[in-house]
Image (cartoon, rainbow, N blue to C red):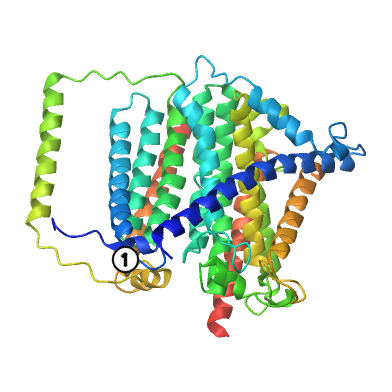
Amino acid sequence: MTIDSELLRLLLYVVGFIAFIATNAAYLVWLERKEAGHIQCRIGPKEVGPFGLLQPVADGLKLMTKQLIIPKGADSFLFRLGPVLVMTPAVMCFVTIPYSDTIVARNLDVGLLAIFAFASVNVLGLLLGAWGSRNKYAVISAARVVSQNVAYEIPMLIVIVTMVMVTGTMNLHEVVTSQNGGFWHWNIFRFSASPLMPVAFLIYFVCMLAETNRAPFDMAEAESELVAGAFTEYPGMGFGVFFMGEYANIVVGTSMATILFLGGWNCPFGLWPGLHWFLIKMYALIFTVIWIRWTFPRTTFYSLLNLSWKVLIPVAFANLILTSALLKVL
Amino acid sequence: MTTQTFPVEALAGLLLTPPGFTASQALTGLLFLGFVAITLAGAVVATGARMLVRSVAGLALCFLGVAGLYYYLASPFVALMQILIYIGAVCVTIIFAVMLAETAGQEREVKRKPVMTFLGVAGSAAMTAALAWVALGTKWSGAPAAPEAGSLEKVGQSLLTTYSMSFELISVVLLVAIVGSLVLARAGRDK
C-alpha cells in the first residue's frame, strides 16, 4: 500500500465520518423529539414527511439559511472558534474507533488514550465560545461546564484505567477481540477480573452523561435558568455545529461503552459478529441516553458535584484497588 | 545534525503501514515544518495577544504543535498525554482562573518602557543564540531505533524503575501545590 492510497483511504474515512456525524445528529434530533413525545403522551413531529421523517431536512435548511450574527460586544475570533473546537476533536475521536473487525480508519496502539485526549478538548471549545459571547448566562454556564467536566473526568478515567488493567491493552481492536464470543465473555460480566464490573459500567455511563452535558446533568444548557447557557448568543449554523458536536460526542461516548464493556461488534450469542451488532448496541445506549433525559429532572449543581466527589470517585477507586488485587492474586 | 534525513519511521505510526517511500520523505518534512509552524504561531499569539483569554488560546495551539512534535518523534503516548493534560486540563484551568479574575471586555494596558523592550529582545536573542550554540556544538548520537519506546508498557516500567524517584518527587510537589492552594483559598475566605 503506497502512502498515497493510505492517505486517500484516511481522507475518505474522515469525509465519511463528517457526513455520518451530520446526518446522524439530524436524525438523533428527530429520535429525541419522537421519544420525548411518546414519553409525554404526545406523538412528536409528524407533519413533514411520513412520521415526520423529513423534519430534520427542514430543520437543517432553516439553520443553514439563518443569518450568522456576531453580537457587537463579542470577541468575534473566539466566538467563531468555539463551535470549531467542539466539532473537530469529535471527528478526530471517530478515527480510532473500530466499528467492526475491518472497518476502522486508523487502528492506533494507544487508541483508547487518543479518544479521551481528543474528547477532553471539547470543554475548551465550549469555554472559549461562551467567554467570547460576552453574555452573563454563557459565562455562568462556562463556569459550570468546567467544574462539572473536571469532576466527572476523574471517575471516568479511573474506570478506564481499570479497564486497561483488565484487558492489558489500549488498542481498541484488541480490547474487542479479547471479548470474543457470547455475552458472558464481555467485560461487563467479567466477574473473574472484578465482581464490581457492572458497577464500573454504571459509573462510566453516568460520567459519560455528565461529560456530554446530557440531562439530568445538562447544567451547561439549563434552559429554565440560563436561557440556552453557553449557546445563548449563537445563531443558525453556529448553534447547529455545537449541536452536531454534542451528538457526535454522545456517539463517541456510547461507542466507547460498547467497545469497553459490551463486546464491540460481537454478537451476544457468538453468531454473525459484525458492524450491525456494534450499531445495535450503540443505538440502544443512545436510546437510553435520550430516555434518561426525558425521565429525570435536572439535578441541582451541588448534588451533581456531590455525586461525583462523594460517590463515584470513591467507588471507582475501590473498584480499581479490588481489580488490581484480584489481578495480582489470580 | 544538519544533513540528517527525516526519520521515516517516525511517521509510520501516523500515516503509513510500511514506511520508506519517496513521497513519504517529503510529507514527513512538511509535517515537521507544519508542527514547528503551529508551535511558533501559538507561542507568538500567547505572548503578543492583548486579551488574556486569547493568550491562553495561543498557548493551547502551542501545546498542540508540541504534541505533534512528540508524535513525530515516535512517542504517540507522550503526544496524547500532552493533549489530554496540557490542552484538556491545564489550559481549561487557566481560562477558568482568568474568567474569574478578569471582567469581560477588559484589555491589558501594555505600556512598556523602550528600555524594557530593548532588554526583552536582547535577552531572548541571547537565549536563542545560546541554545543554538549548544545544539550545534553537541555531538548528537543517533537516537536508538526503539519504536516501542513510547509504548504504554515501557512508559510504565521506566516510571516505576528508572525514574521512580522523579515520579515520587513530582507527586510530592503536586500534593504541596494542592495543600498550598487550599491554604490560600481558606485565608481569602476568612476575611
The residue drawn where x is 24% and y is 58% is: B6
Residue A289's place in the image compared with A106, above or below, is: above
Q: Is residue B64 left or right of residue A312?
A: left
| Nearer the observer, B97 or A233 | A233
Residue B117's place in the image compared with A73, above or below, is: below
Q: Residue furthest right?
A: A41
Residue A68's place in the image compared with B130, above or below, is: above
| Figure quadrant of the N terminus of chain A | bottom left
Mark 1, other Cα within 10 Å: few <14 / some 14–19 / many ≥20: some
The image quarter in which residue B28 lies: bottom left
Chain letter behind tag 1 = B
User: Where residue B77 sits: x, y (%)?
Assistant: 40, 61
The image quarter in which residue A222 lies: top right
Q: Is residue B60 left or right of residue A253?
A: left
| Nearer the observer, B96 or B74 | B74
The image quarter in which residue B135 lies: bottom left
User: Where residue B91 sits: x, y (%)?
Assistant: 42, 41
Residue A132's place in the image compared with A160, above or below, is: above
User: Where residue A254 sits: x, y (%)?
Assistant: 66, 55
The residue drawn where x is 28% and y is 32% is: B47
| Nearer the observer, A143 or A76 | A76
Q: Is residue A12 left or right of residue B3?
A: right
Q: Residue furthest bottom?
A: A330
The residue drawn where x is 70% and y is 38% is: A300
Res. A306 in view:
no
User: Where residue B138 sits: x, y (%)?
Assistant: 9, 59
Q: Secondary structure at mark 1?
A: loop
Q: Is residue A189 left or right of residue A138?
A: right
Q: Which residue is mark 1?
A: B20
Q: Amino acid at mark 1?
A: Gly
